[in-house]
Image (cartoon, rainbow, N blue to C red):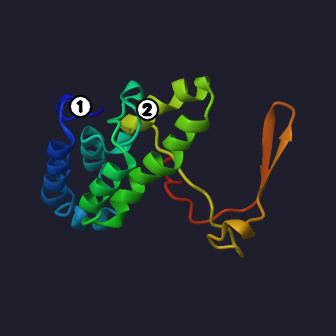
Amino acid sequence: MTSPDILEMDFDSYLETIRRFTDEELIPGEAAMVEAGDVPPALMARIAENGLFGITLPREWGGLDWSMEQQVRLTLEFTRASPVYRSRFSTTIGLCSQILHDHGTDAQKETYLRDMATGRCVTSFALTEPGAGSDATAVTTTAVRDGGQYVINGHKRFITNGAWA
């Protein structure tokens, strides 16, 4: 859950908060993360408290409603630390929540967006395939409508956040 203090900040104050968080918690936490083979749950909770799962989502969905330009400025701060941190939440902020916000049904938005913005719903991204790598034009996975659902057939590998989604 995003800290109430975060919700009251202007952008420059928030940027400074993320700069300090990166210096004081993310970078020092890298050794423990490597040793554990995962981002410790307590640090994931701190990432959520700092609002990083909802950077660009509107406040009505629990986000911070920063612009894409502001997101880039924030990214420059937190990517001074291990890219593992970024991959744990940027899949949610860039690939999944924005697509759902812009193109999802009202029911999908109600079901997922608030939990995405607070880190309770972890999302994943599955592009890479054997023989295609991450070349989106070479993937062979298919999604075929079958009545009211889709049947997906194919093989994926290196699924970002697949272990937590």
| Observer able to see residue 90 | yes
Farthest bottom residue in view: 131
Give the residue at x 53% y 45%: 96
Going from the N terminus, do you reach mark 1 or mark 2 first?
1
Give the residue at x 59% y 24%: 106
Report helix, strand or loop for mark 2. Answer: helix
Report helix, strand or loop for mark 1. Answer: helix
Query: Which x, y percent locates residue 141?
Result: 76, 59
Check the image and report above or below for 82 versus 67: below
Check the image and report above or below for 117 versus 80: above
Horizontal side of residue 20 vs 122, given as left or right: left
Q: State the residue position of label 2.
A: 115
Q: Residues within 10 Å of mark 2 (few under 14, many from 20)?
A: many
Q: State the residue position of label 1.
A: 7
Mark 1 to mark 2 CA distance (whole Å): 16 Å
Horizontal side of residue 95 vs 4, given as left or right: right
Give the residue at x 19% y 57%: 22
Quarter that holds the N terminus:
top left
| Observer able to see residue 38 | no
Mark whose residue sits in front, 1 or 2 = 1
Query: Which x, y percent locates residue 80?
Result: 25, 66
Q: Nearer the viewer, residue 55 or 143?
A: 55
Check the image and report above or below for 115 versus 56: above
Query: Which x, y percent locates residue 129?
Result: 68, 68
Amino acid type assigned to the residue bearing label 2 in the image: Asp
Amino acid type assigned to the residue bearing label 1 in the image: Leu
Query: Which x, y percent locates residue 109?
Result: 54, 28
Look at the numbered discs 1 and 2 and tell me whether their residues touch, using CB distance below 8 Å: no
Give the residue at x 29% y 63%: 79
Q: Quadrant of residue 132?
A: bottom right
Q: Residues within 10 Å of mark 1 (few under 14, many from 20)?
A: some
